[in-house]
Image: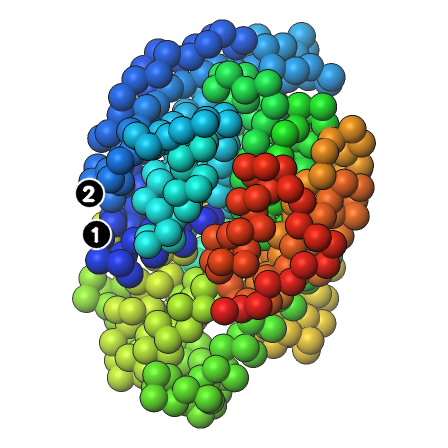
């Protein structure tokens, strides 16, 4: 797959597991709500405690869960708003269903409105994430100061999970993609990945045809205005992580007068093209991996692959190319699976020790932890079945991108980035093939100012691998009304990691108090 984007839902799940709650590897695909409300009409909400029970095994104390579904035009068309629709195009007259979940505290007082959530991806479930975030700070969720003033509303964007999901990549092809050598050095191996990318693209093209561009970010941002109307808010209050920052920035450009407050955490720079964005991630993951190896050398008691963690990891990948360890289910821990275990572990600082232990066990012939980490990233369950996260990820990413580099150009970048970012560069370059071989048309999102919007809070983490910190001031500058808040920490996204970050974001969401210019919060 092209870019390494993980949703906050996965991170929230990891936090709950660490706290002693049992979560399935894959969120269930329960329908959220009954009959969907037609475009422009109010939805019917119903109690849905079963969603939290299936995700986590129980609901959060003092929380009620309600679900609904709304219909939105497949193609909003140019210049339309919530309740409008296109009169021409591949989706004319047709609708998608958008699933919503509302978590409401029984202690709610002085209600401000709804806080709409997007966890990123693209492909992450906002319904699941609203449940995870409802569990409070002890489980990595939102503070009571927020849940007692806002309904927490998650929605699955079009094509994702419960919202008219895109599903066109068979499990076997996803296994082949994740297990493929992350740096196919020989021309034969490179051509093999080209063929796999073509097969995936043909399958999705055959199934969805000219509908594929309708899964792009601008269409989803227009859906978000329908969500705002459905929850009864005159203006949107929004918390978007990772790719969710791009969705929020697009909303702000389309509907600046309908913004109350936007928190964009883990910023994506919308002006970066496909190649520049992928190289930025290669640099970000290489930097994060360097931070991991430094930690390992200084914490040998917790890092069994110290003192030279880089050498141990590189050796593990090289060994997996020629003699992969076999898991209990017969699956081979190829170089690709080892690579994605590394990627998965770098999204949180707490994952560093897990990575070191997994590589150490792999050296001893046990790939169990490698598969656990990689499968968590890939959203693959114990039976080898995948959610539609990466189907949707491809559909959205490729609809958004105008760039379509040639195979020759990608091959050149693979060599160039191997020299600059040895562990991650080749994989990010080769991953460009996914959209280069994609059959659908394109529908790029806007990249301009949000004139008329109030101040928008853009949060960045200096050690973020997936959305490198350099993108944070770039997004704030593009919007023209962005205010940067910096966390000098590790991992992907910042809120609510520390009291400094939490207090600044809470004050903004509740009282619309913008943090002082240049505020930087320490790692601890």
Q: Where is residue 408 in the image (x, y as percent from the top left)?
A: 72, 59
Closest to the observer: 63 or 186? 63
Q: How crowded is mark 1: few (under 14 residues within 10 Å), some or many (20 or more)?
A: some
Closest to the observer: 100 or 476? 476
Say whether residue 181 is left or right of residue 300.
right
The residue wearing badge 1 is 22
Q: Earlier in the sequence, mark 2 or mark 1?
A: 1
Q: Quadrant of residue 332?
A: bottom left
Q: In which quarter of the image is residue 465?
A: bottom right
Q: Where is residue 5 in the image (x, y as percent from the top left)?
A: 52, 52
In the rendered image of this protein, does residue 503 appear above or below residue 116? below
Can the viewer see residue 482? Answer: yes
- Number of numbered callouts drawn: 2
The Cα atoms of the two marked residues, 2 and 1, are separated by 7 Å
Q: Where is residue 16 in the image (x, y as percent from the top left)?
A: 30, 53
At 59% across and 18% down in the image, what residue appears?
A: 234
Instruction: Tell which residue pokes out farthest to the front in this image.
Output: 110
Instruction: Tell which residue pokes out farthest to the bottom in this image.
Output: 307
Q: Residues within 10 Å of mark 2 (few under 14, many from 20)?
A: some
- Model colouring: rainbow
Helix or strand or loop: what does disc 2 sit on? loop
Closest to the observer: 492 or 106? 106
At 58% across and 50% down in the image, what residue appears?
A: 504
Q: Position of residue 469 (x, y in %)?
A: 66, 61
Q: Quadrant of residue 62?
A: top left
Tag shown at residue 260 = none
The residue wearing badge 2 is 57
Helix or strand or loop: what does disc 1 sit on? loop
At 50% across and 32% down in the image, what residue appears?
A: 116
In the rendered image of this protein, does residue 179 appear above or below residue 85? below
Q: Are marks 2 and 1 in contact (CB under 8 Å)?
A: yes
Can the viewer see residue 439? Answer: no
């Amino acid at each position: 797959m092209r870019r390494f984007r993980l949703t906050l839902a996965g991170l929230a799940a990891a936090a709950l597991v660490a706290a002693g709650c049992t979560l399935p590897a894959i969120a269930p695909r329960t329908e959220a709500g009954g009959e969907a409300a037609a475009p422009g009409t109010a939805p019917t909400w119903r109690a849905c405690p079963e969603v939290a029970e299936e995700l986590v095994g129980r609901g959060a104390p003092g929380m009620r869960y309600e679900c609904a579904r709304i219909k939105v035009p497949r193609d909003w068309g140019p210049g339309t708003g919530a309740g409008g629709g296109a009169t021409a195009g591949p989706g004319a007259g047709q609708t998608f269903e958008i699933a919503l979940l509302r978590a409401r505290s029984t202690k709610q007082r002085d209600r401000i409105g709804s806080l709409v959530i997007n966890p990123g991806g693209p492909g992450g479930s906002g319904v699941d994430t609203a449940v995870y975030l409802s569990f409070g700070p002890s489980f990595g969720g939102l503070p009571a100061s927020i849940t007692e003033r806002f309904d927490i509303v998650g929605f699955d964007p079009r094509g994702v999970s419960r919202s008219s999901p895109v599903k066109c990549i068979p499990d076997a092809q996803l296994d082949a993609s994740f297990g493929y050598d992350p740096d196919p050095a020989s021309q034969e191996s490179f051509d093999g990945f080209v063929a796999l990318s073509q097969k995936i693209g043909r399958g999705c093209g055959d199934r969805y045809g000219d509908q594929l561009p309708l899964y792009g970010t601008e269409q989803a941002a227009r859906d978000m205005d329908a969500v705002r109307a459905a929850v009864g808010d005159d203006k949107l209050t929004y918390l978007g992580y990772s790719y969710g920052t791009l969705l929020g920035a697009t909303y702000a450009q389309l509907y600046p007068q309908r913004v109350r407050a936007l928190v964009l955490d883990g910023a994506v720079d919308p002006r970066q093209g496909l190649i520049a964005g992928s190289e930025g991630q290669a640099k970000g993951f290489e930097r994060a991996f360097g931070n991991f190896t430094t930690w390992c050398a200084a914490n040998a008691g917790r890092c069994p692959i110290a003192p030279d963690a880089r050498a141990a990891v590189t050796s593990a990948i090289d060994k997996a190319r020629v003699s992969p360890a076999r898991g209990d289910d017969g699956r081979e821990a190829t170089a690709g699976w080892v690579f994605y275990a590394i990627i998965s572990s770098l999204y949180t600082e707490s994952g560093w020790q897990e990575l070191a232990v997994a590589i150490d066990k792999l050296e001893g012939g046990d790939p169990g932890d490698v598969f656990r980490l990689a499968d968590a990233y890939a959203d693959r369950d114990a039976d080898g079945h995948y959610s539609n996260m990466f189907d949707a990820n491809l559909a959205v990413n490729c609809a958004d991108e105008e760039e379509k580099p040639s195979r020759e150009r990608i091959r050149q970048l693979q060599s160039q980035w191997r020299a600059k970012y040895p562990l991650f560069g080749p994989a990010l370059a080769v991953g460009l093939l996914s959209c280069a071989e994609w059959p659908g048309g394109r529908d790029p999102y806007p990249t301009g100012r949000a004139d008329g919007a109030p101040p928008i809070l853009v949060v960045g983490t200096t050690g973020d691998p997936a959305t490198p910190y350099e993108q944070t001031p770039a997004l704030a500058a593009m919007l023209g009304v962005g205010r940067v808040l910096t966390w000098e920490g590790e991992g992907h996204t910042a809120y609510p990691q520390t009291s400094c970050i939490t207090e600044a974001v809470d004050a903004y969401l509740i009282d619309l108090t913008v943090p002082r210019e240049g505020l930087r919060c320490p790692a601890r």
